[in-house]
Amino acid sequence: MIIQPANRTNSVNEYYFSRKLQEIDEMNRQGEKVINLGIGSPDMAPAADVVDALVHGAQNPDNHAYQSYKGFRDMRMAFADWYRKYYQVELDADHEIQPLTGSKEGILLLSLAFLNKGDKVLVPDPGYPTYSSATLLTEADVVPFDLKEENGWMPDFDALEKSDLSGVKMMWVNYPNMPTGARANLQLYRKLVDFGLKHRILICNDNPYSFILNEEHLSILSVDRAKECCIELNSLSKAHNMAGWRIGMIAGAADVIANVLKVKSNMDSGMFKPLQLAAVKALAQPASWYITLNKEYQERKKLAGDIFDMLEVSYDKSSGGMFLWGKVSDTWKNGEELSDFILKRARVFITPGFIFGSNGDRYIRISLCAKQPVLREAAGRIKKSLGIGGLCHGSWC
């Protein structure tokens, strides 16, 4: 190329799944027909009236202009109503909610709005890789904090208090946790709020999985004084089967939202109005929508558990979210070795845990975003290719 990339691009790599999907696509072009159990992209359809709202909205010629940077007020009101109904959180739709092009956008917007070069950000290990990537792209410093199985995948506050917190400006948390499936409780959220207030750290809770295999819907914003130090990201991608629609939101104190809007309004020109009209319908779905959705995910989780049992992978049957996370046996050097072995021998892709941080090195993750027959076929391939009770891998036997 005739110019050099910005130095900040040297701090990040192409997203793991972007690269892995290219590898899988190449295998499929060669006739391998790989079953992908890696990515959490819901395969079920949104509610019918949600799709109808999108179609009818797009047919209205008045709905194709630029939209408000703050989003259609009816959609902001719908988010506020949803939070009141399910999380018991009161939000000012005009000042405490900002719609996003998917909650992933919010991770970067928050980083751009609040981080300077040399600031520090507490990032969970294991955790969503985008937390680190957004931090590095703003030339801030990533400070990993451990999540360990023996501690229920919760932050070790004693260790955090003993660590050097000078310069720490933000902390990312995510419950129900991705990738581990650990659930939050109000005690954890109270500890996080107290920690943020004590050390003047913005606690950023990424909360897209609270309706998936999780009966108690919790928001960190329900804790007293949370808005003084916390924000929350949420999304329609997971619980409403709308991942490709890219509709999310950020909620928090008015001054935080104002600074996010300051950045966002210089980066895009609003969300397509029919998408916003459809979001209003999605957020108004009855409780039965989530019940039906979770019945399906529960069945898929059992099938994913069967695969882990076959592979002698230990896992928590009570976990939430749309993934199953498990620890590989000592037969394998790490989760990546088992993942690569299964891909090569059974043509089934299961995510290795190392991509979420060093604490995920001995783990693998199965996405529940595959229909039951696909999960059964994956189990059959693994059984046929590897054999029950006879896993051999030293020479790819």
Image (cartoon, rainbow, N blue to C red):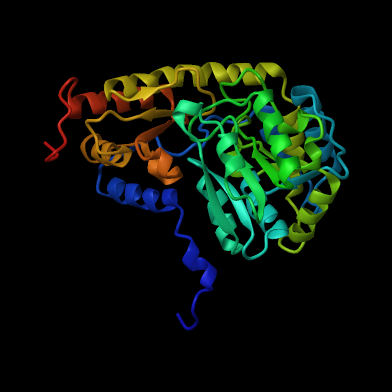
Image: 396 above or below 294 = below
Q: State the image quarter where residue 281 is shown.
A: top right
Residue 391, x across and y down, in percent: 17, 28
Q: Can the viewer see residue 102?
A: no
Query: What's the residue at 51%, 29% (across, down)?
Result: 322
Instruction: Work out whether residue 359 can be spotted.
Output: yes
Rendered location of residue 389, percent (x, y): 17, 20
Quarter of the picture holding the C terminus: top left
Residue plotted at (55% across, 32% down): 177
* 309 and 267: which is toward the camera: 309
Q: In x, y percent, where is residue 221?
A: 76, 33
Q: Is residue 78 left or right of residue 147?
A: right
Q: Is residue 266 left or right of residue 30?
A: right
Say which of 97 and 55 sits in front.
97
| Residue at (69, 53) in percent of width and height | 110
- For residue 370, side relative to residue 312 (left or right): right
- The quadrant holding residue 366 is top left
Q: Is residue 184 left or right of residue 280?
A: left
Place residue 382 in its image quadrant. Answer: top left
177 or 307, which is in the foreground? 177
Is 113 situated above or below 337?
A: below
Q: Is residue 347 above or below residue 261?
A: above
Q: Position of residue 165 (x, y in %)?
A: 63, 50
